Image (cartoon, helix red, strand yellow):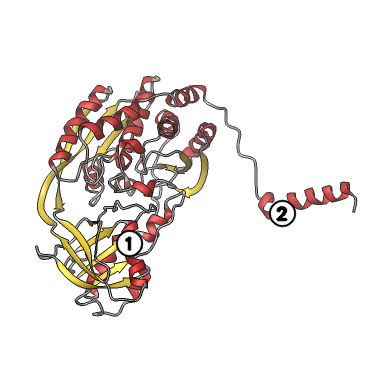
Amino acid sequence: MSKTSLLAATVLFTLSSPSFAQRTAPAPVVPDAHVASLRDKALTDDTAYAIIESVTTEVGPRPDGSEAEGRARTWAVAKMKALGFQNVRIEPYNLPVWQRGIETAEVVSPFPQPLRLTALGNSGATPPEGLTLPVVYFASFNDLLLAAPGSLIGKIAFVSNAMQPTQDGSSYGSQGLARFVGPNIAATKGAAAIVIRSIGTDHGRGPHAGGTNFAAGVAPIPAAALSVADAENLVRMIKLGKPVTLHLTLTPKQIGDRESGNVVGELPGTDPAAGVVLVGGHLDSWDLGTGAIDDGAGIAITAAAARLVHAGGKHRRTIRVVWFGDEETGGFGGIAYAKAHAGERHALAAESDFGADRVWRFNVNLPDTAKAVGDRLAVALAPIGVVRGTEVAGDGTDVGPTLKTGVPAVDLNQSGLRYFDWHHTPEDTFDRIDPAQLAQNVAAWTAMLAIVADAPEEMGPVTPKR
């Protein structure tokens, strides 16, 4: 076959193959110069960076129900007003509060040495003097599920499934089961306590905090996350074939209901009947770091973007920024918001709660009447490296209860390749923020808000993501 014939055959095969034959050109979209101008301006705006610096420096860690969380609300009201938001207020609610106490662990035998760990939220407590018990090793969460009932009586379960980095963060959902429900499973099989390898992608000695839940009728047992490095070391000890005994002391406690609250600020639109665009992140944080990426970044990104859109001129819909008071220990902030605003018309809801690294993809859940909004988003976001996904949007603990009522959604997905190195650790600090990637987030959110808040299309109800 000649080179010309070979080329022709190759072209014919390529065009007729399923992967190419199914591709069609999208409808043409005229770029919006105003949206593009706001998006590009956001790339040099430092408002979000300044907000994160302020909250981590002036408030620091913001555990739910703590005095610091109360100071964070006071800080938030002042900050929103300074940024030009209107109708700024705190919407209070109560939530149950768990408080950590002493938390230590050490290998007693065969190779005595201390371990670094942190109690999981809602963990039960050991006696004040601690527990000294043999360890039963499970290489995966599934291995724990396979353990026979009663086989863990008088023992400490140790689950060491390893999490790998993924761009979409999906490994958190699969490997996180060891934390989310592992302690409950261990308790039902008779374990006196459980330690898990931290749900994170690092290999350091900073443990990853996070909540766990026990089913009704299951007494909480002491539950803690070992730093990844210490968990790996413990695995090496176990593989040497000698019985391993741990001494574990955890003294957390439930202290009853305390007041929390959502901090709300608005940028009024020109057409109140067009509905509210709800965006935000959560103000609370775990106590090991200063809550820079989780979720100082989220409150900063959404507020900075909303401010840029409002400063750029009119928008039909009111943009409401909510800094939710509690996400980490049960999502009580999102639940309280949905109840308080159940009678209002929301045109869209979206949240930022995945750190400060670049947005790489967006997904939508829009009514048929607003399909063109998604097309305009694709054109506006492409220049900053954001691709259109094929999934149904609707993620987020904070806006989840509102989305369940049929409110349209946009998800701006950030890269998760670094996020779980620092998530819920002592390393969640201001220096983890990459200013350039943060600015790209603000640019993506600015473009999205500029399009959605002023869209002429009807933003009616949708079928919520399942």
**Residue 77: percent from left, percent from top:** 20, 29
Q: For marks 2 and 1, give the one nearer the viewer.
A: 1
* Residue type beneath disc 2: Ser
**Residue 426: percent from left, percent from top:** 27, 46
Q: Measured along the vertical axis of the image, is residue 60 above or below residue 164?
A: above
Q: Tell which circle, 2 or 1, labels the residue nearer the N-terminal end.
A: 2
For residue 231, which numbered disc appears in the image?
Answer: 1
Q: Residue furthest right?
A: 2
Report whether 230 appears left or right of 92.
right
Q: Secondary structure at mark 1?
A: helix
* Residue type beneath disc 1: Ala
Q: Which residue is mark 2?
A: 17
Residue for point 33% across, 71% down: 238
The alpha-carbon separation of the residues under discs 2 and 1 comes to: 49 Å
Q: Is residue 461 visible?
A: yes
**Residue 215: percent from left, percent from top:** 22, 66
Residue for point 37% across, 49% down: 420
Of 99 and 157, which appears nearest the observer? 157
Image quadrant for the N terminus?
A: bottom right
